[in-house]
Image: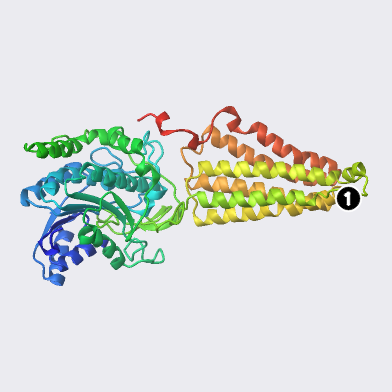
Amino acid sequence: MRPIEEQVILITGATDGLGQAVAADLAGQGAALLLHGRNPERGQQTLEEIRRRTGNDKLTYYNADFASLADVRRLAERVTADHDRLDALVNNAGLGVEVRRHVSRDGHEMTFQVDYLAPYILSHLLTPTLVASAPARIVNVTSAGQADATIHFDDVMLERRYDGVQAYCQAKLAEVMLTFDTADALRGDGVTATCLHPASYMPTKMVVGLFSVQSSIADGVRSTVRLIADPALDGMTGRYYVMEREERANPQAYDAVARARLPNDSRACRQTRGPERAMDDATRDRRRGDAPLTDTARPEPQAGRPVGARDSATVAVKRADGGQGHSAGGAQRRRIAVSPMAPPRAGAASGDGLGTERLAALSDGIFAIAMTLLVLDLKAPGPSDDLGGALAAQWPTFLSYVLSFLILGVFWVGHRLQFSYIRRFDRLQIWINMVFLMVMAFVPFSAAVLGGHARERTAIVIYGANMTAGWTLLLVNWWYAARHDRLIDLQPDSRLARATLRLLWVAPLLYPVGIALSLMSTTASIVVYALVPTLYVLGHPDRHGRGTPTDRAPSEQSDG
């Protein structure tokens, strides 16, 4: 890389938050900066403030609203017309989590356009200038939230079921995929492409007063500026960083089929393939010595309207420049499920929206231990005992063991099935599941009481209360997920949702019936208890060939 004072660097979303702070840092080092924003007044204020603080006069402001792809193209045209060299492009502008679905002027879901399509087009249109300026760098500011996303190619624009968290996280995942594709396309041309989660919960307008600050703005600046200007990273390309630590991104970002489908199969990207052709043709023509082609493609507008969505934690979502949002305006109280800048994840997920893998592992362990403990109440007859008589004397314990093992098995299957339909847990739902697992860990005790005192009403009540609590918590877990839009590919009024809810209601109703019957006959109570796993297995919708969402491979989904 050239010395920083000789570099020309374009930063999008540079009039607020992280983008503004990165611009001030680079200006202080003497770089020539091209600062992008969508509010001319704020843009001029930013220029004046940075000039005053750094004494750097090599600053230019460019206005463009990324809600319009025509504005993105005009920005690229103006930059290439004004500058014959560009040493670094920092794609920082973006929207946060939007509670309602908004459609851009070009007919695309707004978050996907601003956070992915805009940097996609801008990067491709500026590629000839970057290649001509090599060595050069492209740095995409993404989020650790990408780790919790899955891009569903049959509904990239989230027209059938909108969720603001999914919109944000999938756009950030798409930006990571863009980074890797750009790195591959330009490998050997002297232009590197990297992306990063700069820092978690920085003291920005979106965080202060709503979340505990975990990182400083300086942390985010240090991480971002390092990828822009650190000579030690010369030649490093196709990498994802969490702050200054290289990490693996979402597995889908490494999926060759998904990477190919993103630009080629999704409706929005098919409509914006002009820039991709421009980059490919420009690169090929440069290698042949021909003049690069220019992009003339324009997407056709599509109809769309806001669609409501329900989310869970109240935060301030601000549409503003600077990595914390794109559009101008003050902070607004909205209902969302995770912070747009989620913390680095440890394992499956991070932030307020927590993934399911670790909780599922804990659930598996507790169920395995509980099911194993059941057998400890069975005693092998001694050498001097009458084998038949000793075994016959333990029939209540055998009955309790078999019944409890089957019921725990149905609990486990039901709990795991819920995990396949729930995309993430927030902290309240984590504790719902913690209490559920505590109740499951109590089953060996209640089973031992039932096995030792099968004809006593108190034992029937203890066992029935244990099971009623478990099924009730399982029902609450499902209800909470459905109520707060945490289900994957499942409308709350769908046949599967109704069937599952009906099944979850059966057990909490039957066990109290069994408890009541103990006033007349403990045997009748045990028969009712035994009906629960039987009815659940016979009535479960998966027996009729529906399967779970994870059973449907991407290749089986149609683009639409």
Q: Residues within 10 Å of mark 1 (few under 14, many from 20)?
A: few
Residue in view at x 9 percent, y 52 percent: 85
Left or right for 32, reference 139: left
How many tags in the picture? 1
- Residue 198: x and y in percent read 31, 59
State which quarter of the image contains the N terminus: bottom left
Residue 100 shows up from this direction: no
Horizontal relation, residue 250 to residue 491: left or right = left
Left or right: residue 189 versus residue 534 is left
Residue farthest to the front? 383
Q: Say left or right for 326 vs 541.
A: left
> Colour scheme used in the picture?
rainbow
Relative to 312, residue 278 above or below: above
Asked whether 552 or 501 is in front, the reply is: 552
Amino acid at circle 1: Gly
Residue 292 location, quadrant:
top left
Quadrant assignment for the C terminus: top left
Residue nearest the observer in this picture, 494 or 435: 435
- SS at mark 1 in the image: loop
| Residue 334, position as x, y percentages in the image | 39, 54
Q: Residue 42, located in which quarter of the rendered image? A: bottom left
Q: Measuring from the top left, give residue 435's x and y in whole percent.
A: 62, 56
Residue 206 can be seen, yes or no: yes
Q: Residue at x 23, y 40 (%)?
A: 105
Pointer 1 residue: 382
Q: Position of residue 141 (x, y in %)?
A: 28, 54
